[in-house]
Image (spheres, rainbow, N blue to C red):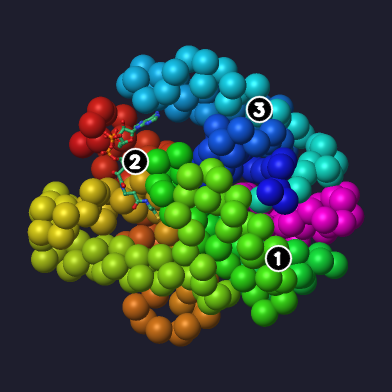
Amino acid sequence: MAIQSVGVVGCGLMGSGVAQVSAQAGFPTVVHEISPNALEKGLGSIRKFLQGGVDKGKLSAEAMQKTLSNLRGTTELKDLADCDLVIEAVSENVALKKEIFGTLDQACKPGTLLASNTSSLSITELATFTRRPEKFLGLHFFNPVPLMKLVEVIRTVRTADAALADANTWCAAIGKTVVNCGDSTGFVVNRLLVPYLLDAIRVYEQGLASRDDIDNAMKLGCGYPMGPLFLIDYVGLDTTYSIAGIMFDEFKQSRFAPPPLLKRMVLAGRHGRKTGRGFYDWSTNPPS
Ligand code: 3HC
């Protein structure tokens, strides 16, 4: 197998999950954060998730220790230089990604595959920040990464067949099911999911039904594990707003336009689970 070691840039909600599943599958994994504090916070969330697995009887204490021994944190991008695959999972900011991919391209060995976990930015554009577009692709994971079985593997017109095959093989090795798709904003899942989530906000905004009735309608009427307003809180209102804005810019279709209520809640700091308040109050267990 071509990919033997993995680097992850960003140890937030998504990056920590990606680093965890990689280490858990036995790959030596180096995860990067900008500061020791941010790194410790991310590694702490991985330890907490693994401990939760041990407590639930899903994971042995030995498997947890083995996972942690495969994982190394760093605040230096150059420590990812020898990895066979580096996955960027920082916030959806093109300038920041440009800087990171430029640095990685300089630092990493020629064979390293570079990938972005972006949910809505153009993989083709991100590849232009490197001199290796044939070794560049999208690896889009889903939240919560350790539990969600899917990875969207995105190729651009420049991605080499061998790079795609190696990425698909690695995703299978970490226990995920792959959906291959081309580089179009939102790929498959967000192209379908985002208009649905935005419509749920519009229905709520119009007073058609209460928050709980909207969520129960989709949970009990369609068998979804979470209602749409709960899921927006889970994903983050800021993240949903940012993805919707990028998709609206791309397609110029009203179905992707962020509803006014979403914008106001983001401005008010109600970003959902991550800030303790969104459509739900997350200071209670379960959220109320
Ligand atoms: N370690 C190991 N296993 C664990 C665990 C842990 N710490 N915590 C939970 N699990 C296991 C449970 O034991 C259970 O296993 P089982 O099915 O064998 O019994 C399973 O994981 C489910 O856990 P829970 O029973 O605690 O929780 P739920 O059944 O409520 O499921 C959920 C949680 C998987 C998050 C489910 O609610 C769900 O699928 N929600 C939808 C999430 C979703 O849509 N995500 C995508 C968002 S979009 C996105 O990410 C894209 C981005 O670009 C925006």
For discs 3 and 2, the disc positioned in front in the rendered view: 3
Q: Which residue is mark 1?
A: 162
Query: Sequence order check: which comes first, mark 3 or mark 1?
Result: 3
Task: Characterize the local packing of mark 1: few (<14), some (14-19) or many (20 or more) Cα atoms within 10 angstroms.
Answer: few
User: In the image, is 235 to the left or to the right of 127?
Assistant: left
Q: Which residue is mark 3?
A: 70
Q: Position of residue 253 (x, y in %)?
A: 40, 84
User: In the image, is 47 to the left or to the right of 197?
Assistant: right
User: In the image, is 97 to the left or to the right of 22?
Assistant: right
Q: Residue at x 19, y 62 (%)?
A: 204
Give the alpha-carbon distance from disc 3 to disc 1, as whole Å.
Answer: 26 Å
Toward the viewer: 66 or 114? 66
Q: Residue furthest top?
A: 61
Q: Position of residue 174 (x, y in %)?
A: 54, 43
Up/down of 131 relative to 66, above or below: below
Q: Position of residue 168 (x, y in %)?
A: 58, 58
Q: Which label sits on residue 277?
A: 2
Residue span colored magenta: 88-116
Q: Secondary structure at mark 3?
A: loop
Give the alpha-carbon distance from disc 1 to disc 2, as whole Å.
Answer: 45 Å
Q: Position of residue 121 (x, y in %)?
A: 59, 68
